[in-house]
Amino acid sequence: MDLWGITAVGYLVSLLGVAGGGPGCTELAGLDLQRSLAWESGSPSDVESLYVTAASAEPDVAALRQWTGRGLEVESAMLVIGSCTADTRTPDLVRLTVVDRLAPTRAVDGSGVATSLPVDTWSGRHVVLQQVDGRWRYAEVTPE
C-alpha cells in the first residue's frame, strides 16, 4: 500500500475508534491527521503550529528533528486511535483518555531507500485539546 493509502486507512480506523468517544475525539482524529502530514513535510514549524504553545510542542518537534537531523524523512506518521473517551469538556477545552499506536511507518534516506519502522504497540495517553482562534490544537499530551 502506498503512503496515502496507509494514511487514509489509519484515519478511517481512527474514526471507528473515536465513534463512541464523544465530543473531542473526532477533533483529535482530525488533528492527528494534520500532525501526520506535518511530520511528512519534515517541517518543525508545521508541527509546532498544531500546538497551543512552543513548550507543549517541544517533545514532538525534538523527535522530528532527530529524524531529519539524520537525513531521514518519515512517511505516514499517522496515529491510529483504538479508543478515545472525553473526560471533561468546555466549549474551548477537552480532556481525553486515548489508546493509540503508530500506523505502519517508513523512514526514507536521501537516496530514496525506505526502511519500515518497527510495529508499534497500543499505548495510553492523556490529551488536552484547546480551541484557539477557531481551530483545535494540542495543549498537552502525557503518557497514561
Image (cartoon, helix red, strand yellow):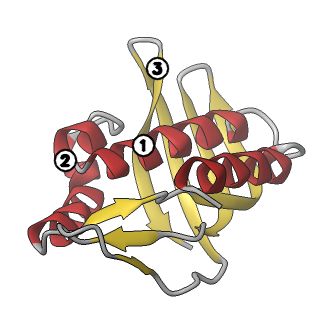
In the visual, does 142 lie left or right of 98? left
Viewer-proximal residue among 69 and 114: 114
What is the three-letter code of the residue carrying label 3? Arg
Which of the image's four quarters has the N terminus?
bottom right
Find numbered disc 1 in the image and state the secondary structure of the residue it sits on: helix
In the visual, does 77 lie left or right of 43? right
Disc 1: CA contacts within 10 A as few (<14), some (14-19) or many (>=20): many
- Distance from disc 3 to disc 2, alpha carbons, whole Å, reads 19 Å
* Residue 113 horizontal/vertical position (percent): 31, 75
Image point (57%, 73%), residue name: 144
Indicate which disc residue 37 carries.
1
* Residue 109 horizontal/vertical position (percent): 23, 71
- Distance from disc 1 to disc 2, alpha carbons, whole Å, reads 12 Å
Viewer-proximal residue among 39 and 122: 39
Mark positioned earlier in the residue sequence (3 or 2): 2
Name the residue tied to disc 3: 135
Indicate which disc residue 44 carries.
2
What is the three-letter code of the residue carrying label 1? Leu
Disc 3: CA contacts within 10 A as few (<14), some (14-19) or many (>=20): few
* Circle 1 or circle 3, nearest the eye: 1
Image point (58%, 56%), residue name: 2
* Circle 1 or circle 2, nearest the eye: 1
Picture quadrant where residue 83 is located: bottom right
Name of the residue lying farthest toward the right: 20
Viewer-proximal residue among 14 and 56: 14
Mark positioned earlier in the residue sequence (1 or 2): 1
* Residue 26 horizontal/vertical position (percent): 71, 36
Disc 2: CA contacts within 10 A as few (<14), some (14-19) or many (>=20): some
Indicate which disc residue 61 carries.
none
